[in-house]
Image: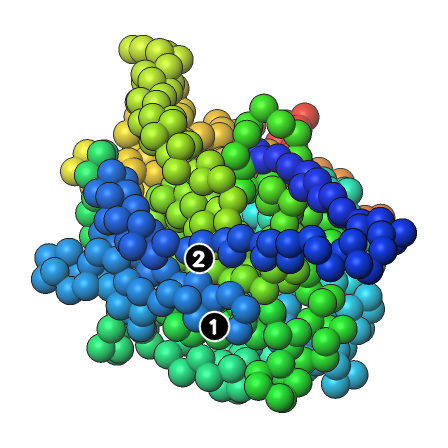
Amino acid sequence: MATQHRFSQRAARGVFLAVLTAALISPGWLRADFQSIQPPPAKPAKKPGPDFKKLRLFMDAELKRWEVPGMGIGIYKDGKVLLNEGFGYRNLEKKLPVTANTLFAIGSASKAFTTMDLQLLVDEGKVEWDKPVQAYLPDFELKDEVATARITVRDLVCHRSGLPRHDGLWYGTSLTREEIYQRLRYLDFSADFRSTMQYNNLMYLTAGYLVGKLTNGSWEEFTRQRIFEPLGMTSSNCSVEISKKSDDYSLPYQRREGKVEEVPFRKIDNIGPAGSINSNVNDMLKWVTFHLNKGKVGDKQVVSEAGQKEVYTPAMFMRQPMLSIQPDKQSHMVYGLGWFIETYRGHMVVHHGGAIDGFYFLNAFLPNDNIGVVVLSNLGGTPLVQLSMGYILDMVLGLDPVWEKLIPERFAEAKKEEAAAKDREKEEEAERVKDTKPSHPLADYAGEYEHPAYGVISVEIKDNALQGKHFFFDFKLDHWHYDVFKPSDHLTKITFLTNLKGDIDQLSAALEGSVPPILFTRKASEAMKDPKFLAQFQGTYEVREMTLTVTLKGNALFVERAGQPTAELVPYKGTEFSIKGREGSSVKFILENGAVTEVVMGGRSGSVRGKKVK
């Protein structure tokens, strides 16, 4: 998940095909004796069942075509598991096969478990879908005041908060779930509250955080006790660290520069409610069966039938369906609470997928046809997951096998996309301004730059080049042009910004494409926050006809003068401080022989100097 390497799905366009039926009514005026001589009505021809031999041949061939190490397939229909098998390998090097018990990451399909957690609490009267989040989490805060006050529990889980993804806040970071939750207030919006659907993992983190608060526990504990255990999902877990202790788990693989390689597991426990669950074919079949059985396990009603339907009741309109077969036709998809809902060739399909480094998953159920399908893969982002889902639905529904015919076309499209990516790199290079230099010596760019949500980007000089670090990501900063540097193996360029003094004091990085670049401000030295260091600047200063009084409160300096409110002095560098709330204004203390003797007041119109008198 990540990235659409962070809990994302590739949506495509599709079509609704109407199914026409005709009823033949026998004339009621026929005499009985006439009817008696007619041949008995022919029995309707029995539709052939799914051809699993053909499916196995299909999977073997397509695994090779798409270079997918391994996949797991599960099919349920009319009260029976028709298929639960593994294909290919869970470990390429050791040639360990995928089985129906092999654990894979299911990524964003975890969201449906979080919404089911909430529905269980709704059934118990502990939460209401349409009540403001602040009624349960008083410290919940977003940058938009209207959204903060009005956003409901339902809004959290149908992607209509107005916030874009901002996945850089959690992906690859060491921040805890609560730390991320507390930083939501600093994130920019890209749309008005409830105006459009914008997929957002952070709101699902908040939903899981709410589950923990309401139950005096954690999202993980509640999910395990109230869903995994009642459904008999004995292998499923909420952390890849647990998966790695299993005897049957898959390694993650990713295509890099045209080659399939094993990649490290991505631990995403902090965003768990949005995507950290790991499961297998057998357990996920129990999950889709639970939904087809209207919230029951056997004779036990785990969640109310009305509540079970609530989670796949449409809440937000979407422009493009996923199970596309005719791109030239217009069709649509809607989002419920943790589920996508669309019509596939006249059949209602409820589904959700999930992607995270090295894994891609899709599960679906057809409530009106009593069919459930799960597809698990250990190659991140492979189109074969959706293609297999379409192929299986055609087969189980007894429809003309359109996907089988489309696959070669989709394969060619995928290859064109790979080539197009290389062309985009060439276009980017053509936009580079040649033969330019940075405006400052490299040493001036070194330092720590901070954003209240996205944390710190550290820049240092190593081997005569700039080296950057953001959370767990280390990267070399190659000069691109002017004060723009390009991180190695990273997603966005970094621009260093100069203030009115000529100092490099900020950097910007487009970590979220739908909002302006994120600004990181250079941090002052930690020594400038030491009360022992700050104490020497206390006193009274005469600047022309003004009297300034500098006082120390805690670990911060404050300055006051007649007729103006007291202002905090924010550490800048050396013995210079910015005046908080007054852009371009500063106070610099002058030392002689280790003692403070003067102060320099800076502003947009220049600077003035005064002596310390007390």
Q: Position of residue 584 (x, y in %)?
A: 63, 35
Q: Is tag 2's residue or tag 1's residue first in the polypeptide sequence? A: 2
The reply to whether the C-beta atoms of the residues labelled 2 and 1 are less than 8 Å apart is: no
Given residues 538 and 85, the one toward you in this image is 85
Nearer mark to the viewer, of 2 and 1? 2
Residue under circle 1? 80
Q: Position of residue 276 (x, y in %)?
A: 44, 66
Separation (CA) of disc 2 from disc 1? 13 Å
Question: From the viewer's perspective, is residue 62 above or below residue 149?
Answer: above
Q: Is residue 507 visible?
A: no
Can you give x and y, in whole percent of width and height, for residue 363 in the image?
49, 59
Q: Which of the numbered marks, if any, corresponds to residue 292?
A: none
Horizontal relation, residue 232 to residue 444: left or right: right
Please tell me in which quadrant of the rendered image residue 105 appears: bottom left
Q: Is residue 291 left or right of residue 495?
A: right
Q: How many marks?
A: 2
Tell me if residue 567 comes above or below residue 499 in the rendering: below
Tell me the residue that label 2 is attached to.
49
Give the residue drawn at x 45%, y 40%: 401
Q: Amino acid at mark 1?
A: Lys
- In this image, 280 relative to 176: left or right? left
Q: What amino acid type should be assigned to the residue bearing mark 2?
A: Gly
Answer with left or right where residue 7 lies relative to residue 113. Answer: left
Helix, strand or loop under label 2: loop
Q: How is the image coloured?
A: rainbow
